[in-house]
Image (cartoon, helix red, strand yellow):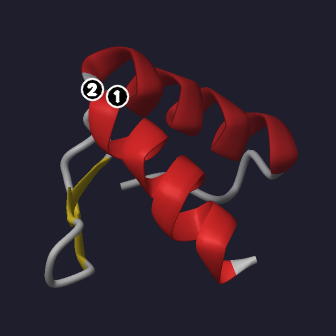
Amino acid sequence: MQTSLAHSDLPKLAENGLVEFDRRSKAVRYSRPPDLLDKMLRLCANFDDPAVEYR
């Protein structure tokens, strides 16, 4: 599972601007999501529970 995360999943997330991933240090930092993803997360939060507001 860790191998998949470091070699496949994190690089894909980094390519799409969701995280910053340094392979050497294995450091992962959350990046601000692109506008489209931000809108989708807001929509999903409202769909799941209209009382919950995504920030």
Nearest to the observer: residue 3 or residue 46: 3
Q: Residues within 10 Å of mark 1 (few under 14, many from 20)?
A: few
Residue at figure coordinates x 62%, y 28% from the top left: 43
- Of 8 and 18, the residue lying toward us: 8
Please identify the quarter of the rendering in which residue 35 is found: top left
Q: CA distance from mark 1 to mark 2?
A: 8 Å
Amino acid marked by disc 2? Pro
Measured as percent of width and height from the top left, residue 20 is found at 19, 56
Quick check: 38 above or below 2? above
Quadrant in which the N terminus appears: bottom right
Q: Earlier in the sequence, mark 1 or mark 2?
A: 1
Q: Is residue 1 above or below residue 18?
A: below
Name the mark nearer the viewer: 1 or 2: 1
On the rendered structure, is 31 left or right of 52?
left
Q: Is residue 5 above or below residue 46?
A: below
Mark 2, Cα crowd under 10 Å, few <14 / some 14-19 / many 20+, is few
For residue 16, which numbered disc appears in the image?
A: 1
Q: Front-most of 27 and 50?
A: 27
Determine whether label 1 and label 2 are within 8 Å by CB.
yes
Which amino acid type is shown beneath numbered disc 1? Asn
Q: Is residue 50 left or right of residue 7?
A: right
Secondary structure beneath label 1? loop
Residue 11 percent location from the top left of the image: 39, 46
| Label 2: element kind | loop
Q: Which residue is mark 2?
A: 34
Q: Is residue 12 left or right of residue 4?
A: left
Residue 38 x %, y %: 39, 32
Quadrant occupied by the C terminus:
bottom left
Q: Please, which residue is most extreme toward the top here?
A: 36
Identify the residue shown where x is 84% and y is 47%: 48
Which sits in the foreground, 1 or 48? 1
